[in-house]
Amino acid sequence: MRAWVPGRVARAMTAWVPRGVPRSKWAWATCRIPRPRWAWATRLPRGPRTVRWRLTLLYGALFAAAGALLLTFVYLLARATGGGPGTATVQSSQLDGGAPALSTPTLTRVAEAARSDQLHQLVVYAVVALALMTVASLALGWLMAGRVLSPLRTMTASARRISADNLHERLAVSGPDDELKAVADTFDAVLARLEGAFEAQKQFVANASHELRTPLTLQQAIVDVTLADPDASVSALRAALARVRAAGQEQERLIDALLTLARSQRGLETREFVDLATVVGERLRGVELSVRARLESAPVLGDPQLVERLVVNLTDNAVRHNLPTGEGSWVSVWTGVDARGRPGLRIENSGPVIPADQAAGLFQPFRRLGAERVGKRDGLGLGMSIVAAVVAAHGGRVRARTRPQGGLVVEVSLPPYAPAEHRIPDVAAAGISHSAPVV
């Protein structure tokens, strides 16, 4: 029989091993320390692992404890209210049948002995009854626990059947509005959100595949047409190569936009102080449209590159999807801190009339609004999606609404951060005239 040896003792005894003898055999051969008696505790089976067993034992333990307290109270009450020396009233002269009379101390001892026997029988009967009722309570507790947990088993089986292929299924638990139904309703709500996320992901993959395939198809068509002409001139070849290069650049921009979207959805890696007024002012310098700007300090704690990409996408969107030059096109920009102390950015532009119900889908990937946004392909369809992802990564909110006269208004609100030592003074964008507040 192998002996149990503590770790330190085994290491000390196996420090020197004879040549040709395995270390393990030498350790067992040299160790004669008996296994401690408490070692059996490590092999004991664990407690009940199911909630039904735990509830059953809990019910039985509570019943046994309550029954023991009740019997103890009854025993103490019976012992306290039992008769004293005068419980047995016996004639002092003689007993029934003419027996000689007994003295009072003898009668007292007889009464106390009888009373002690009665209390002993009461305790024995009570303990037996408590044991039987405890066993019965365990059986009833097992049945009641099974009945209570039956909806939970049903929900577990239904949840195991649900996978990525059938997220449309729901638990749909009926019954009273209790805790179990609340859990089932919460799980159904989670499934609904997961289904929406999976559908959005599938739609995004399909749209991204289509958008990536379009430049490839164009490049292949240009190459095939050029190769089919054996008498193509040098200028024609150069023109074909220029178109192929333009298609490749569009594909590169699309991939870069997809990478930026993925990065913004992953969260913030760095946090620095950025002033929206400074970023917007630098971006508006090269805009050729009529710009009305009121730039006040709007300090933000976030990723400078993502914040810059947010401003670039919003300004490019306002300039690109605007009225033609010379038809009264304009862009209005505001940065500052609102009444709740949240730094914000608002960009408003003129443009074609867009139905109000289409503004909600503006932040979906590859979604273009209005006739010009659908017909022209000078945009990738990811600008506003990146804006929404960047704002979400910074813990802010973004909202878009259409103007009845045409155009769009986009409002961005970010979390406040304005300690005195990090306040950035108000700046005015160089070369941009200030005007009335944007309405």
Image: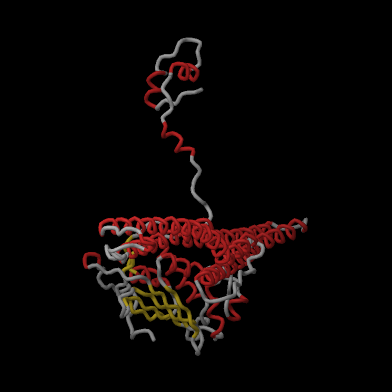
Residue lying farthest left? 421
Instruction: Estimate the x, y position of residue 331 in percent, counting from the top left.
Output: 43, 80
Residue 369, given in percent of the width and then of the height, sits at 57, 78
Q: Residue at x 41, y 75 (%)?
A: 412
Residue 89 appears in which quarter of the rendering?
A: bottom left
Which quadrant would residue 410 be assigned to in this image?
Answer: bottom left
Q: Is residue 27 left or right of residue 301?
A: right
User: Residue visible at 61% across and 65% down?
Assistant: 154
Say whether residue 379 is visible: no
Please, is residue 106 above or below residue 435 in the view?
above
Nearer to me, 43 or 227: 43
Q: In the visual, does 422 lie left or right of 280?
A: left
Camera-side residue of 408 and 19:
19
Q: Quadrant of the C terminus?
A: bottom left
- The residue lying toward the viewer, choosing from 229 and 172, is 172
Q: Position of residue 211 (x, y in %)?
A: 63, 64
Outermost residue toward the top?
Answer: 19
Residue 415 on image: x %, y %: 35, 70
* Nearer the observer, 12 or 31: 31
Which residue of the protein is positioned furthest toward the bottom in this rendering?
405
